[in-house]
Image: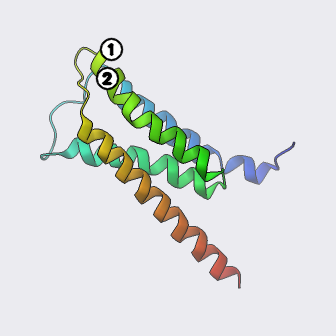
Amino acid sequence: MTVDRSRRWSYAPVLVAVVLQFVLLYSPSGGGASPFPNFDKLVHCSIFALPVFFALLARLPWVPVIAVLALHAPVSELLQWALLPHRSGDPWDVVADLVGMALGAAAAHLALNREQTERW
């Protein structure tokens, strides 16, 4: 199966979003002081929304995308708790991750519907 060049480039934002997610989730420190309370929840929401949004815009199959990221949310917290000495696992971060995924999927749905409407 070959993928044309323009479609191949649609995967680049997905890759960047996933790399950013891994860097932020698995860095040894939490990044310092928060600018406001629960800022980390906003970060979690964002770093799970972006890969979903870009993956769905790239027309990757939504079931595997959602399944993999939904599994990654609690696994990342368990890994932070067990393996990263200056990090802790937080169940509320998993909730923020899942909310971010829902927001990313909703935004992608809206963007794709708008694209379809503009074609008509």
Relative to 115, is 44 above or below?
Answer: above
Residue occupying the point 12% across, 46% down: 37
Residue occupying the point 66% across, 51% down: 61
Relative to 107, is 36 above or below?
Answer: above
Mark 1 element type:
helix
Instruction: Say the numbered circle drawn on residue 13.
Output: none
Give the amino acid at mark 2.
Gln
Judging by the rendered image, the residue that carries numbered circle 1 is 83
The residues tagged by marks 2 and 1 sit, at their Cα atoms, a distance apart of: 6 Å
Residue occupying the point 24% across, 30% down: 31
Q: In this view, does 58 lie to the left or right of 74?
A: right
Q: Quadrant of the N terminus?
A: top right
Give the amino acid at mark 1.
Leu
Q: In this view, does 120 lie to the left or right of 72?
A: right
Instruction: Say the numbered circle drawn on residue 80.
Output: 2
Q: Is residue 42 left or right of residue 111?
A: left
Camera-nearest residue between 25 and 93: 93
- For the residues bearing labels 2 and 1, Cβ distance under 8 angstroms: yes
Camera-nearest residue between 90 and 13: 90
Residue 34, picture quadrant = top left
Q: Where is residue 33 drawn, in percent x and y?
A: 15, 34
Q: Where is residue 8 drawn, in percent x and y?
A: 73, 46
Mark 2 element type:
helix
Q: Where is residue 59 drawn, in percent x and y?
A: 66, 55
Camera-nearest residue between 112 and 29: 112
Residue occupying the point 49% across, 58% down: 105
Task: Return the residue found at the far bottom.
Answer: 120
Residue 116, picture quadrant = bottom right
Task: Return the residue found at the far right.
Answer: 1
> Badge 2 local density, few (<14 within 10 Å), some, or many (20+)?
many
Q: Which colour scheme is used?
A: rainbow
